[in-house]
Amino acid sequence: MAIIGYTRVSTKDQDTSLQDAAMTEAKVDRVYTDHGVSGTLASRPELDKALDRLDRGDTFVVWKLDRLGRNTKNVLDVIETLIDRGVTFKSLTEQIDLSAGPMGKAMLTILAAFAELERATMVERTRAGLEAAKAKGKVGGRPSVIDAKKLATINKLIASGDHSRADIARMVGISPATLYRVIQNF
């Protein structure tokens, strides 16, 4: 009977150290981790591996329910699959243990719905903030690496026909992908 854990972070910049510490404390045998993967996706590479690895009598552990997913239906589908396969589910933060019977499943359903609501609220706030900034004339994204001087140099180098695109990008100090985007906007 193995204890299999699953951790997830939404962006590559985040780390799982807090989740990993909890998994160690819970004496998890093996942890599968998705980095930079949204919790709204039903299928995630490491989650799929973890679920495939589970056998009857095993325990599947997450640090917090929203790490399993941010879509109520997807979370409940995973839980149903676990139950059907005879696998125990535990969420360490919310202390959900489905071996506790119907009350555990009811709590899980409510918390899954709140995780989905939290994500939807974040998306809504972000969208509203971007729209407010746009209305004030602010544009999001990274600042352009192409100023007027670089653009003039690029134009001259292309017009001369003596240099490859890769050479021009290197000479101007930009990536070839950036150069191609600049050329498309001529």
Image (cartoon, rainbow, N blue to C red):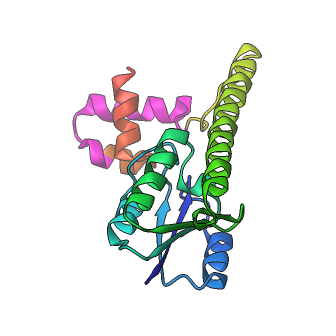
| Lateral position of residue 97 relative to residue 172, left or right | right
Q: Does any portion of residue 184 appear in the rendered image? A: yes
Provide residue 158's location: percent of width, then percent of height: 30, 32
- Residue 112 included in the magenta stretch of the image: no
When the figure is inspected, residue 150 is found, relative to residue 28, above or below; the finding is: above
* Quadrant location, the N terminus: bottom left
Which one is in front, 123 or 160?
123
Residue at 41 percent across and 39 percent down: it is 178
Among all residues in the image, which is located at the extreme front?
Answer: 101
Which one is in front, 177 or 153?
177
Which one is in front, 141 or 80?
80
When the figure is inspected, residue 59 is found, relative to residue 24, above or below; the finding is: above
* Quadrant location, the C terminus: top left
Provide residue 143's location: percent of width, then percent of height: 61, 36
Residue at 28 percent across and 28 percent down: it is 159
Q: Tell me where residue 183 sits by quadrant.
A: top left
**SS majority, magenta:** helix
Residue at 46 percent across and 49 percent down: it is 173
Which one is in front, 35 or 138?
35
Q: Does any portion of residue 155 appear in the rendered image? A: no
When the figure is inspected, residue 130 is found, relative to residue 119, above or below; the finding is: above
Among all residues in the image, which is located at the extreme top?
Answer: 135
- Residue 151 included in the magenta stretch of the image: yes
**What residue range appears in magenta?**
145-167
Provide residue 69's location: percent of width, then percent of height: 54, 49
Residue at 67 percent across and 47 percent down: it is 111
